[in-house]
């Protein structure tokens, strides 16, 4: 799935779920929360924690969903965003 399609699916989820779109700062808080969950998964995978946590791919998915939801709130085209970021990073190689 490309980024444009992912953005559309996130918007469709909000419509189908009957859930009101989350305020921007709530989305941002969810992103931060999910990044913490990714960190916990990494600690387990790297052997620093023994506690069972969610799977890493689930947490990346949750974080990505929230990032896309926030991008949608600001009407960003993530395909364009990624093209610009690769132009920037390609200057370093």
Image: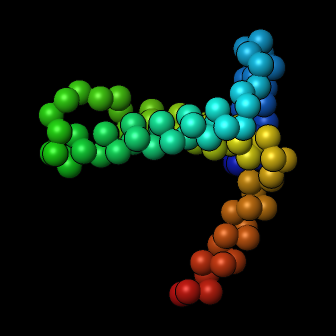
Left/right of residue 77 with respect to residue 2 in the rendered view: right
Q: How is the image coloured?
A: rainbow
* Circle count: 0
Left/right of residue 42 with respect to residue 63 in the rendered view: left
User: Is residue 83 depicted above or below 23 in this figure?
Assistant: below
Residue 38 image offset from top left, x and y in percent: 39, 42
The residue drawn where x is 57% and y is 37% is 29
User: Is residue 70 depicted above or below 80 in this figure?
Assistant: above
Q: Quadrant of residue 91?
A: bottom right
Q: Is residue 61 visible?
A: no
Residue 63 image offset from top left, x and y in percent: 54, 40
The N terminus - image quarter? top right
Residue 27 image offset from top left, x and y in percent: 64, 35
Q: Residue furthest top?
A: 18
Judging depth in this view, the residue of 45 and 49 nearest the camera is 49
Q: Is residue 21 visible?
A: yes
The residue drawn where x is 79% and y is 36% is 8
User: Is residue 10 depicted above or below 78 in this figure?
Assistant: above
The residue drawn where x is 81% and y is 47% is 74
User: Is residue 21 depicted above or below 80 in this figure?
Assistant: above
The residue drawn where x is 31% and y is 39% is 40
The C terminus - image quarter? bottom right
Q: Residue furthest front?
A: 25
Left/right of residue 64 with respect to residue 48 in the rendered view: right
Q: Quadrant of residue 69?
A: top right
């Amino acid at each position: 799935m490309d980024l444009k399609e992912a953005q559309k699916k996130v918007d469709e989820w909000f419509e189908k779920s009957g859930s009101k779109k989350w305020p921007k700062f709530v989305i941002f808080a969810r992103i931060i929360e999910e990044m913490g969950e990714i960190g916990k998964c990494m600690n387990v995978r790297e052997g620093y924690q023994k506690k069972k946590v969610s799977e890493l791919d689930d947490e990346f998915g949750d974080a990505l969903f929230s990032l896309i939801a926030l991008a949608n709130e600001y009407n960003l085209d993530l395909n364009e965003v990624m093209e610009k970021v690769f132009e920037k990073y390609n200057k370093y190689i």
